Image (tube, helix red, strand yellow):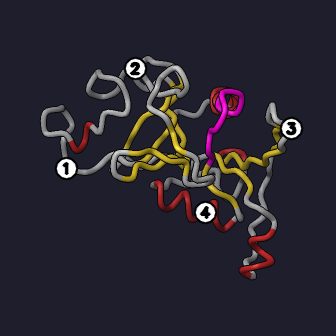
Amino acid sequence: MLKLIIFGVVTLLSSIIPAVFGQQCSVGRTLQYRDPRGVTHNYLFSWENPPTASLELDWDGANSVCRRHCMNLVSLESAAENTFVKQHISSGRKRYIWTSGRKTGQSWTWTGSGVGIGLDRRRSDWSHTGGAGIPQPDNRENNPRLEGYNGIEESCLAIFNNFYNDGLKWHDVS
């Protein structure tokens, strides 16, 4: 299982969650972004928040930290949002982050919003390469025909920053 140093970018959940569930939300430095539809999103970039800046977590751990902030790992539902987040990763010089992308069966979904993730590279940002040198998602760690096989499903979506000389791109990881 890959453990990423940066646990990711998170997007704000409805303010109703603390009221309904009585949850206390941790405070962090958030950045607002207004998408092309005019909807405002709040982001907590872990590397800019002192209490989370040095955390090294797997996907579940990162998701738990986000939930403590009444947030979810980021769901990249538009090209503009994807560009905004990637620019922030680049300016922060981060090698990789977690997203809310998860694979269930043969389908990928943004767990933060429930929106499906397509495999069409014209409407998504999957890399053309990875550890096995083939397009993402490749489920390399769970494919006995590929180098790196260990029997673990690659069911999480991370953004790697030029990890395979491919720029800032989506990769499936375990």
Residue highlighted by disc 2: 128
**Amino acid type, mark 4:** Val
**Amino acid type, mark 3:** Gly
- Mark 1, Cα crowd under 10 Å, few <14 / some 14-19 / many 20+, is few
* Residue at figure coordinates x 77%, y 57% from the top left: 28
**Badge 4 element:** helix
**Amino acid type, mark 1:** Gly
Give how far across and how far down residue 120 sits, in percent.
46, 26
Q: Nearer the viewer, mark 4 or mark 2?
A: 2
Question: In this picture, is 108 found above or below 36?
Answer: below
Residue highlighted by disc 3: 38
* Residue at figure coordinates x 30%, y 28% from the top left: 131
Counting residues from the start of the chain, the first of labels 2 and 3 encountered is: 3
Proximity of marks 1 and 4: CB atoms separated by less than 8 Å: no
**Badge 1 element:** loop
Q: Quadrant of residue 154?
A: top left
Q: What range of the chain is rendered magenta? A: 74-82
Question: In this picture, is 113 found above or below 166?
Answer: below
Counting residues from the start of the chain, the first of labels 1 and 3 encountered is: 3
- Mark 3, Cα crowd under 10 Å, few <14 / some 14-19 / many 20+, is few
Residue highlighted by disc 4: 65
Q: Nearer the viewer, mark 4 or mark 3?
A: 3
Give how far across and how far down residue 31 sits, in percent.
81, 44
**Amino acid type, mark 2:** His
Q: Nearer the viewer, mark 2 or mark 3?
A: 3
Q: Quadrant of residue 65?
A: bottom right
